[in-house]
Amino acid sequence: MAIKVAIVGATGNVGRELLNIMDERDFPAAEVHALASRRSKGREVSYGDKTLKCEVLDDFDFSKVDVVLMSAGGTLSKEWAEKIGKQGAIVIDNSSAWRMDPDVPLVVPEVNGEDVLGYDKKMIIANPNCSTAQLVMALKPLHDAAKIKRVVVSTYQSVSGSGKSGMDELWNQTKGIFVNDAPEPEEYPRQIAFNVIPMIGSFREDGFTDEEAKMWNETHKMIDPEIKVTVTCVRVPVFVGHSESVNIEFEEAITPEQAREALRNFDGVQVIDNPEEDQYITPVECKGEWDTFVSRIRVDNTVEHGLSLWVVADNLRKGAALNTVQIAEELIKRGVLSA
């Protein structure tokens, strides 16, 4: 029996990417329903060589599907996810609404795939923050090889992390600057074109932003609560692809060569790292790719056992839509869903 799927938020950037990735990966879906708000009823979205007409979320009978891939924001997820679960469908949610709920697994399949089996407490599985997803892909094999003590992360996050509105703002400001008619910021607190903004989310009382707190809280939940993590999140004028400068202090000695070997042997990671031949990865090269890319692995001599590295991934894919589909595939692999 093939799987019946509903996509909530099908008209958004991530929703459309979910449909693309399901088609690319030949996800065994017998039915796919595209759901959106009432104002988008009948709007068409592409799914492989098919066209789906959007159905209204409020009117949909979720008892007729097996799994719901939800990417429509935290407010809507808080309203709907548990109600959907009570109708028997498993919700895989891409918002921040459920990530730190102790009864909801937070999963990157390559890192902690077995945790999907905890879905049955609320019938919800959470997808991590886009920046956390690629970070833990790099940290997990290194933590297994030589226990991580402390991590310092600076992110360079693309505007697609804010959705279509962020991408439109960068595009319109960039064009406007060249004709001396740049629109005022709306999505961001400062001009994003030709600029960087060291603030994503809202400031907390401790001076960090909630985006930064998400990264250390989610890393603790998925890998190890004993790892000390500090983060600075920065929005940059890049359309797609998040980058991270990562400095790691280990409990044990580990060489760059050993780190490269551990990363190369980890599913979903590619090491592109040869300074002599000018080999490293940038967001432009990772766009449209499934993997997380690691470059510039080198010794940090400021601590006893330290390495520095550069991590890049397509945030709309591994950071969001791809990981969501992979969680559904993990449910199939573990016999929860029958393909």
Image: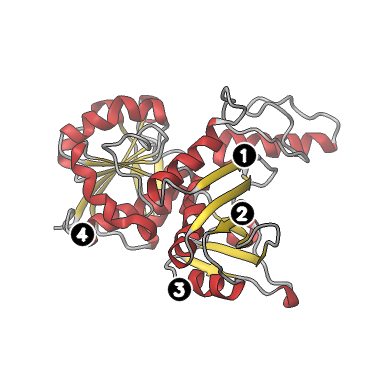
Distance Cα–Cα, label 1 vs label 4: 38 Å
Q: Earlier in the sequence, mark 3 or mark 4?
A: 3
Mark 1 or 4, which is nearer the eye? Answer: 4
Residue 179 appears at what percent x and percent y?
85, 34
Q: Between residues 145 and 85, which one lies in front from this camera angle?
A: 145
Between discs 1 and 2, the one toward the N terminus: 1
Which amino acid, mark 1?
Answer: Met
Asked if one can make out residue 163 in the rendered structure from this viewpoint, the answer is no
Q: Residue at x 52, y 35 (%)?
A: 213
The residue indicated by pointer 4 is: 334
Quadrant of residue 208 within the rendered picture? top right
The answer to the question of whether label 3 and label 2 lie on touching residues, with beta carbons closer than 8 A, is no
Residue topped by disc 1: 167
Marking on residue 246 = 2
Say whether marks 2 and 4 touch (CB < 8 Å): no
The residue singled out by tag 3 in the image is 265
Q: Residue at x 70, y 57 (%)?
A: 302
Q: Quadrant of the C terminus?
A: bottom left
Question: Which is in the foreground here, disc 2 or disc 4?
Answer: 2
Left or right: 318, with 124 as reference point: right
Amino acid found under the numbered disc labelled 2: Val
Relative height, residue 66 to residue 213 (above, below): below
Q: Is the Cβ of the residue at disc 1 closer than 8 Å to that at disc 3? A: no
Quadrant of the image occupied by residue 92: top left
Q: Residue 219's x, y, as percent?
A: 45, 47
Find residue 316 and report its horizontal and vertical position in percent.
50, 49
Q: Residues within 10 Å of mark 4 (few under 14, many from 20)?
A: few
